[in-house]
Image (cartoon, rainbow, N blue to C red):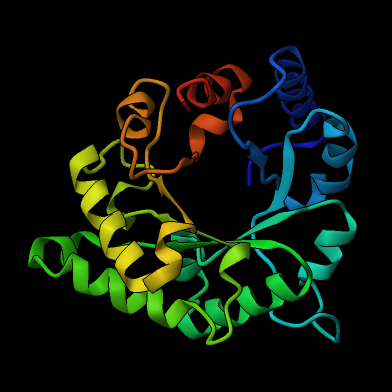
Amino acid sequence: MYGRLTSGLVLARELAEKALANKPLLFDMVLCPPATLTWAISEALMGSHVMLGAQDCHTATHGAYTGDLSAAQFSDLGCRYVIVGHSERRKAHGESDELVAAKVTAAQLAGLTAIVCIGETAEQLAAGNAPEIIEKQLRASLPSKCKMSNLVVAYEPVWAIGSGQQPSPDDIVEVNKVIRKTLGEAGETVQVIYGGSVTPVNAGGILDEIEIDGVLVGSASISADGFWAIAEKCK
């Protein structure tokens, strides 16, 4: 919930300009702004190859759900991605794995790629059962008829979000292997990315690992220079 109209447009336009100046892009860049800025930022990104995403969506395509927004509505605004199951949604709004799975279904029915967030808490990490937690959470957060071609899995350990702490690249790789194994045959093709206190300083070490397909950037994304500095670490 950062950014008003002016600041959001400035950020989007700066990133669009950087993308246009560095064509062809060697990476995918997706901006997921607050819902209020979606339409304006969609226009600002036009022609830049920077894609648009949403931060959440409802499980229904339409209906009497005051205050909610559907994946289809975001698709109308030019979105191609939507984040679902972010740890802040799970914690603050009590979103269950089953609800996240329903959102994945809604997103994919609308033609969007769902970025599904999963991750262990500090307590689960300390207990030493993070791999089991990750596997169980991922299985429960995906619908039975999930379209693997419209899926990105983001490993975001809850204890790393906004804390300045993060697992080592080797630790992230081990979790990503668990994720790919859980996905079965699709594990080799689904993008598995990392999120949690990603900065221009540590992004290079993460993205150097061939097992890590990208990053889900939090607070560093509200600076065009900071966000672009992270993107430039992609190879």
22 above or below 53?
A: above
Residue 209, position as x, y percentages in the image? 31, 35
Give the left or right position of residue 191, taking residue 203 as reference: right
In the rendered image, the residue lying farthest to the left is 127
Q: Quadrant of residue 222?
A: top right
Q: Position of residue 98 (x, y in %)?
A: 50, 85
Q: Is residue 69 visible?
A: no
Q: Position of residue 74 (x, y in %)?
A: 81, 60
In the picture, measured across the screen, residue 106 lies left or right of residue 226, that is right
Residue at the far top: name it.
21
Left or right, 139 with reference to 1 = left
Across and down, in percent, residue 15 comes to 70, 23
Q: Which of 219 and 166 is in front in this view?
A: 166
Q: Which of 154 and 166 is in front in this view?
A: 154
Q: In this view, does 24 lie to the left or right of 177?
A: right
| Residue located at (67% from left, 46% from top) | 32
In the image, what residue occupies the spot 46% across and 40% down?
214
Reply above or below: 156 against 40.
below
- Which residue is at a point 66% across and 61% down the rendered structure image? 113
Residue drawn at x 19%, y 42% is 170
Res 28 seen here: yes
Nearer to me, 191 or 107: 191
